[in-house]
Amino acid sequence: MNNNILTEAAASTSPRRKLSDWEVRPSAKKRIYTASANKKVLCSPASRKRTYDEKEEPVVDIDMQTENAHLKEQCTDLVQENTQLKTYCNTLKSEVNALTLQLEYKDWEYAAEERIPLSHWKTLGFDGFMAELFAHAVKGFIQQLKHITDELRRGESTSIELDSDFFPLRHADILLPHWQEFVDALQQYQRYGHCNDHAIGLFIIQNIELHPKVLAILAPVLKTLSMKKFVLRSNKLAKFGNAGVSFMVDIVESNPNLTYEVGFIDNKIESTSDMRRLCTATRRNNSVLAPPLTTLGLMSHTFDGNNQKMVQTILKSSRDHIKELWLCENGIGLVGARVIANYLASNPPLETLDLRSNDLNDDGARLLANTLPNNKNLSLLDL
């Protein structure tokens, strides 16, 4: 077979190519023509067999494999050693922080004035028996605040519950130094008490009027304090416009260490725009480091349950992330039930819905019950 025949055979079995696409590869006895595009070799079976036989087997470097295995073993040992060193460093840090707390606690004194004369409350409009009653309530509040402050200073507090035992405690500027003592202790606890991730489990302030002056003292530390649940209840915040909502929104959006629940209870929200701000804040869109909160409490006359737009705003603004929603004691009737029924029928990720102590009648309850067969996520509906 001559070169012309080879060329014709290639032309009949391969796409037409320019002459420049072909290259000549020398062989032992003759020239073999190959197409550089698809590497097809036009040669005799004997030549093809000889080409395959000439391929060399890969050489396995035993020494290299042994060295690689040894290096992997060394890396594993180093990772384990690094983990042990980190644990040891954390232990040392905990011990240093504990000693620092002890030293600072020895030098600390509660500086705010604890004895407030009865005459002070009379100048604020309290008279006779009411002045004595209010003075007694303030005394109990100061003792409670001092006790919590002392625990924080010693690094022993795991929950904070500030409450007025008698009635909602009215704000007085004379109490501001006590709030400042409390905040200073929180800041110290944050510096030294969180070395082992001891977050505050529950932080609640209830039955205490929170004046904007108090909110301004609390805000800086609450924007970073590690806590799982943060609740404001019965604080007369509506008295100061939307200052309370703005305060809560600021804390929720700014604090990546608030990890689980927020409650805004018995603090009336009048406008749907404020409600939208609060519910939307729980998505944590403004914080890269913080995942969305999953539990929202809006109980006890926080909103008008018969305001269709208000109920829609709550459900729409919390739809994608809230798994537990507490809406008890808000006067929700048939109007609100229809909105909630449509919401549940869309099968949102909500797992718990608390509607206790509302104004739901049999028709409203039936509307809600009819949505349950098609809802695959809701596990608890409390009426």
Image (tube, rainbow, N blue to C red):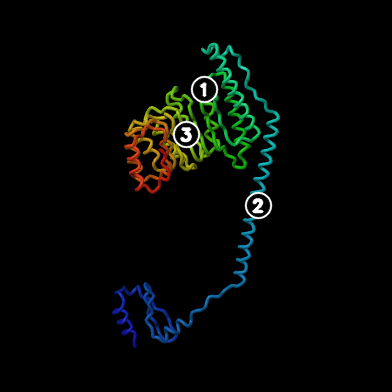
Count residues near mark 2 (Cα–Cα under 10 Å), then give few for <14, some for 14-19, many for 20+: few
Q: Amino acid at mark 2?
A: Gln
Residue 198 is situated, as x and y percent measured from the top left of the image, at 59, 40
Residue bearing mark 2? 84
Q: Amino acid at mark 3?
A: Gly
Q: Real-space Cα distance between discs 1 and 2?
A: 53 Å
Asked whether the beta carbons under mark 3 and mark 2 sit within 8 Å of each other, the answer is: no
- Circles 1 and 2: CB atoms closer than 8 Å: no
Q: Specify the quadrant of the image occupied by residue 80.
A: bottom right
Q: Could you tell me which secondary element the residue under label 3 belongs to?
A: strand
Give the mark, 3 or 2, whose residue is nearer the N terminus. Answer: 2
Task: Please name which of the two marks, 3 or 2, marks the residue nearer to the observer.
Answer: 3
Q: Nearer the viewer, mark 1 or mark 3?
A: 1
Seen in the picture, residue 121 relative to 62 is either above or below; the reply is: above
Residue at 39% from the left image edge and 78% from the top image edge: 24
Q: Position of residue 2 (x, y in %)?
A: 34, 87
267 to the left or right of 133 = left
The quarter of the displayed image where residue 367 is located: top left
Q: Which mark is residue 277?
A: none
Please identify the quadrant where the C terminus is shown: top left
**Secondary element at image label 1:** loop
Residue beneath disc 3: 263
The residue under label 1 is which amino acid type? Phe
Q: Which residue is mark 1?
A: 167
Q: Nearer the viewer, residue 284 or 66?
A: 284
Residue in view at x 41 percent, y 43 percent: 350
